[in-house]
Image (spheres, grey):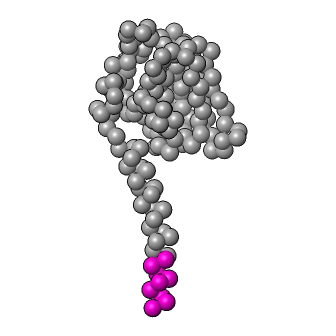
Amino acid sequence: MQVNRVRLLIMAVVLVPLVIIAANVLLYDSTPIASSPGGYSSFTAGGKTFHLTYVATNDTTRAKGLMDTKVTDSTTELFVFPSSDYYSFWMYGVNSSLDIMWVDTPTSGNSGSVVYLAPDSPPCHVTVVCTNYQPTAKANFVIEAKGGFAAANGIKLGTTVTIN
């Protein structure tokens, strides 16, 4: 009888955290891009169009960003803000260096230009030592992609970007 209680306790201690982790992965990483508010699915820069993997349109999804997400060469995330401002970013919990591109568009449109760029921003795993990337210009969109993306695609300050 005692052996069964010990087995049950061990199973509970092991299985409960696994279920919680699996639920978080499903909750954060399986939302299809087509269901994103605003209907954004791609962006065009330097004459090329790129598919958006993730779109963050509220405080919760903007705070999570690409934390705990496998970043590949094709991973991109669009952060949509209600107005142009100086939105800062950090790299806590990200598994790869990222290019962070701040884009400002007129209030009535989805086409603007890169106003600030933080290329190859390294990941950080200790919050107290994470760099805070603060733009010097206001923006209402931010795009994150794997480090080297901007240089490989000719994206620099002033590049025209259209959010589709």
In this view of the protein, which residue sits in the foreground, 73 or 138?
138
Residue at x 43% of width, y 50% of height: 24
| Image quadrant occupied by the N terminus | bottom left
For image coordinates 47% across by 43% down, the residue present is 69
Q: Where is residue 65? Give x, y as percent.
A: 49, 35
Q: Is residue 62 magenta?
A: no
Task: Identify the residue shown where x is 48% and y is 32%.
Answer: 59
Residue 6 appearing in the image: yes
Give the vertical position of 104 relative to 89 (above or below): above
Q: Residue 107: x, y in percent?
A: 42, 9
Q: Which residues are magenta?
A: 1-9
Q: Residue furthest left?
A: 34
Q: Residue at x 46, y 22 (%)?
A: 81
Locate residue 91 relative to residue 72 in the image: left or right.
right
Report how many numbered discs are placed on residues in the image.
0
**Frontmost residue, 108 versus 149:** 108
Location of the C terminus by quadrant is: top left
